[in-house]
Amino acid sequence: MAYEIVIGLETHTQLSTQTKIFSGSSTRYGAQPNTQANEVDMALPGTLPVMNRAAVEHAIRLGLAVGATIAPRSIFARKNYFYPDLPKNYQISQYEIPVVLGGSLTFFVGEKETTINLTRAHLEEDAGKSLHDNYVGPHGESSTGIDLNRTGTPLLEIVSEPEMRSAAEAVAYAKTLHSLVMWLGICDGNMQEGSFRVDVNVSVRPVGQKEFGTRCEIKNVNSFRFIERAINYEVRRQIELIEDGGKVVQETRLYDADLDETRSMRTKEDAHDYRYFPDPDLPPLVIGQDWIERVRQSMPDLPDALRQRFVNEFGLAPVDAAQLSSSRAMANYFQEVVDALPAGQAKLAANWLMGEVSATLNREEKDIAQCPVTAPMLAALLKRILDNTVSNKIARDVFAAMWAGEENGQPDAIIAAKGLTQINDSGAIEAMIDAVLAEQAAIVAEYRAGKQKAFNSLVGQIMKAAKGKANPQQVNDLLKAKLDNA
């Protein structure tokens, strides 16, 4: 039987505020345990929460960026459950009326443009952290430690509609959302530190069936690679279970990266299990149109608008423009290179940025902000391609030397030091062609007998004789003229 995969993501985005959502405690990461938790975070009797205005403005920014409705009046609720790292025994969240309603996210999966609708985005507080591994109590006993530093850190939970149909689509959505929240400046996006955590809801159903299958939620997946692997494993598990006559149970699961598998964590709760009710300590959150407009005026150019400008102004393909506007750092780098080049060379800059630069960054597991070849340095190299100082092929060798820091990364100095200046002298090139033709009479005969591959073989021999430095276009043109006019 053929199955359809149904995926929805719930993304916990830690907001980049200096203090917590309902208290004045610092949100700084990495402090000693329990040094950033005050009486509000610890739920001491008589304490009251006070809403953090900056957290609300971050939520508004996200809502405006995805074309959502900003609720003029939203409600905070108590979500009741017990964990040792949640001192109040409830989490302050939003349920019936969240601050952000609807919206959508558009991105590319390969060459295909895809739009996924959002259900909502709501503000809530984070819980603390239970420390299980290698923790020893005051008397040497094996124990669990509780760190309340994270308690009360502001989160914006962004919920998608269950519209994704493959692991690749889910990863592309997550990457796009990750880039957007960093672009807006509302989250630092550090997945290793837990600033951007994804809960993946997965179910399967026979192709053609309208009703959803039973879903399982994979909690707190903190890398794009793990999102893909967790989904693929869970899909296989559910299909095998169904085809063996079993039944998928609604539950919360964890992904074990070492074993590359998901495993059961607990039975999945429904909303009624949390006994939501409006928090009596917090008044409704009222957001006037004037507040929304002030936030709108402070917004940066959005990725979609920048992507369209790259298409219209530079003639780039939409999928290429999307890659170049995938982050503010990438877009700024590309624009800086284009501005430093002669007019009409945006495609050259785009090809290098999506080609050699991105490939090297991926190999080194770095992002564009960590690129040792700066935009002015890359532009200087591309100018040497444009003025025929080096060929595109030799330029890749120069780029590798720039990346390694040779000659302080300056392309002109590298070209001079390595003797890589392209040979553009037609007389010198003709002499090399004549020498190769004299040595390769058999290949010349093959070409004249109609074998086109023989031409490429001759070009290769000439470039070898020139140590790769002959102007490729001149080699092709002069060789063809000699062969055809002989």
Image: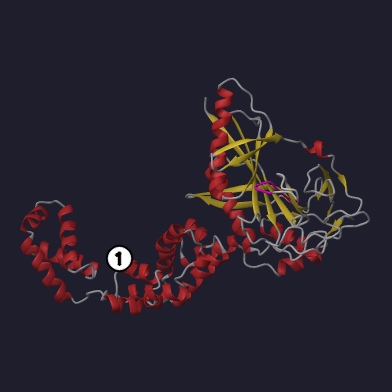
Q: Quadrant of residue 295?
A: bottom right
Residue wearing tag 1:
393
Give SS at disc 1: helix
Does residue 473 belong to the magenta stretch? no
Where 414 falls versus 112 (above or below)?
Answer: below
Q: Main secondary structure of the magenta part?
A: loop
What's under tag 1, amino acid-wise? Lys
Residue in the picture at 18% in, 69% down: 466
Could you tell me residue 460's position as x and y percent? 19, 60
Residue in the picture at 57% in, 41% down: 230
Q: Nearer the viewer, residue 342 or 422?
A: 422
Q: Quadrant of residue 231?
A: top right
Residue 318 is at least partly visible in this image: yes
Where 470 falls versus 20 (above or below)?
Answer: below
Type of colouring: secondary structure
Span of residues in magenta? 127-135
Of the 4 image quadrants, the one containing the C terminus is bottom left
Could you tell me residue 456's position as x and y percent? 19, 57
Residue 206 is at least partly visible in this image: no
Q: Nearer the viewer, residue 222 or 387?
A: 222
Does residue 134 belong to the magenta stretch? yes
For disc 1, the neighbor class at 10 Å (few under 14, some 14 to 19, many from 20) is few
Q: Quadrant of residue 380?
A: bottom left
| Left or right: where 452 falls relative to 299 | left
Where 48 falls versus 233 (above or below)?
Answer: below
> Going by the picture, which residue comes out furthest to the right?
46
Q: Nearer the viewer, residue 41 or 419?
A: 41
Could you tell me residue 113's position as x and y percent? 53, 50
| Left or right: where 386 falls relative to 463 | right
Could you tell me residue 127's position as x and y percent? 76, 51
